[in-house]
Amino acid sequence: DFRTTLYLWFPGMSATVETPEGTVSSDLSPADALSNLDMGFMGSVGAQNRNLILWGDLLYTDLGASESTPHGMLWDQARVEQKLTAVTGYALYDLAPQPEVQFGLGAGFRYFNLSADSSLSGGSAPRVDSSLSDSWAVPVLAAQVYQPLDDHWFMDGVVDWGMAGHDTRTWQAYAGVGYRFNDRWSTQLGYRFMNFSQTIDGKDIDTDLSGILAGVTISF
């Protein structure tokens, strides 16, 4: 059994980035994220053969946020822009005794490609710009659940966590409800949260992405 999902995720962003002048923080609400989203693509694919479940997810976002700074007369505005590609893959074993229910446990990875630009501007001091970029992968442990409620409605969710060293961590969680129109088409609405932290060139980056997710799935 195979399925492909295209979804829209409107995440708010909370990010902290270390710069030569200190830590720059920014917060972006989901509503602001939609207006500040320069480009985005989200999709996932899955396959199941008996008890083996394979699942993959691709996320690309280009987001920017501005905040007032606590630096007084030196700078009065801080801006953080992030271009993020995150690729996640799992191999899970379905432990549910009923064929219509899924409860998968397993492991996988999450690959990140991140470009983070930050700036301090608007005060008496000259503008300060900082850029960081890196690619890295993190092994993750994962759990996934799918529970029908009746012939059409269902609940599903996934959670994972991983780390690769003291400063490299990530975790995410999703929970939602869906409606199956027939054996081929279904739709989902839920809430997704993703966090990642990494040290790039000796500077720490920590980012939270969270918001409503809506998707359409075709199964075959």
Image (tube, rainbow, N blue to C red):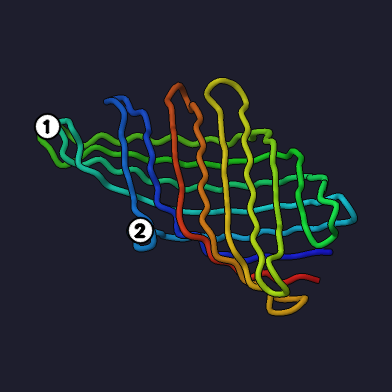
Per the image, label 1 sits on a secondary structure element best described as loop
Q: Which residue is mark 1?
A: 72
Image quadrant where one finds the C terminus = bottom right
Quadrant of residue 44 in the image? bottom right
Relative image position of residue 133 (x, y in whole percent)? 49, 36
Q: Which residue is mark 2?
A: 36
Name the residue rendered at 45%, 59% in the picture.
10
Quadrant of residue 106 in the image? top right
> Looking at the image, is 39 positioned above or below residue 128?
below
Q: Amino acid at mark 2?
A: Asn
Horizontally, residue 30 falls left or right of residue 146, namely: left
* Label 1 vs 2, first from the N-terminus: 2
Horizontally, residue 84 falls left or right of residue 177, namely: left
Task: Return the residue nearer the eye: 104 or 209.
Answer: 104
Specify the farthest residue to the right: 50
Name the residue rendered at 16%, 39% in the picture.
76
> Looking at the image, is 43 positioned above or below residue 130?
below
Per the image, label 2 sits on a secondary structure element best described as helix
Task: Return the residue nearer the eye: 43 or 117.
Answer: 43
